[in-house]
Amino acid sequence: MRFAPGSDLHGCAELVQRADPERFRAVMAAPVAARAALFPIYAFNIEVARAPWVTAEPMIAEMRLQWWRDALDEIRAGGAVRRHAVVTPLAQVLDAEGAALLDGVVEARRLDIEKAPFANRGALMAYLAATGGALMQAAARALGDRDGRAALALGTGSALAGYLRAVPELEARGKLPLPDGRPEAVADLARQGLARLAEARALRGTVVGEARPALLAAAMAAPVLRRASDAPARVAQGGLMPPEAQVRARWLWVGMTGRW
């Protein structure tokens, strides 16, 4: 990883490697300079995403999320920032707008505290845009993207792919993840995710070359969404990932072309 053992960046990289292996794989396909920005952002995402799930007490979950919002407020203000293994390196790669984007991610994660389902597909897609979409926007911005539209669309579609893969686990935890679980509704939802990926591809030219490594995290989104669209029963069965040989081939192609 080329970060000094014991350093904050090394700790962030190890956290991502353990908890988010797909994003770790994407970062390791990026130039070393980009890794120094991406690892703290993805480590932040891990910490925030798991905050609502590590306790059965909603108030404690709220407090954990508020801690991260307070840290982001410090980064956005541009003054002194609390010492923390993730916050400290995060402050070195975010500007005020990037901190604001991640603050929206934290706010949206409050919805994970409740077990109630999303009211409709639009509410679910708004949640995915505010979490995965804004996360990819912030990552791309940290690498120089000032447009943000491609990252938002791609991040939203990729977040849907990840969300559909997580449906069995969410149900096991007592969450009602889908506003409509009928096969035709699930297939239509997957097609909406594919439309977001198509939108991102149409905007590919707006993303500066230095920021494109932030988009590699969406490498598996299209195959997963296609499988959900073609056979929506795979969602409940936990069978959305292609066979391992296809996964390896996909990552090889993404690594060689930089496309998603």
Image (spheres, rainbow, N blue to C red):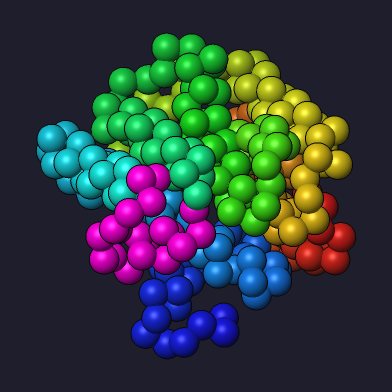
Q: In terms of image quadrants, where is residue 108? A: top left
Residue range of the region highlighted in magenta in the rendering = 76-94
Residue 61 % position (x, y): 20, 40
Residue drawn 57% across the image and 84% down it = 2
Decide whether residue 79 is among the magenta residues: yes
Q: Is residue 109 above or below residue 88?
A: above
What's the magenta bit mostly, secondary-structure-wise? loop
Decide whether residue 201 is among the magenta residues: no
Can residue 4 be seen here?
yes
Rendered-image quadrant of the N terminus: bottom right
Front residue of 8/49: it is 8
Residue drawn 80% across the image and 56% down it = 209
Front residue of 229/94: it is 94
Is 129 displayed left or right of 105 in the figure?
Answer: right
Residue 94 % position (x, y): 49, 53
Q: Is residue 104 above or below residue 84?
A: above
Is 99 displayed left or right of 203 in the figure?
Answer: left
Residue drawn 61% across the image and 16% down it = 185
Can residue 194 be seen here?
no
Residue 253 % position (x, y): 84, 61
Q: In terms of image quadrants, where is residue 240? A: top right
Is 33 displayed left or right of 248 in the figure?
Answer: left
Residue drawn 55% across the image and 46% down it = 138
Residue 88 % position (x, y): 36, 65
Is 195 displayed left or right of 64 in the figure?
Answer: right
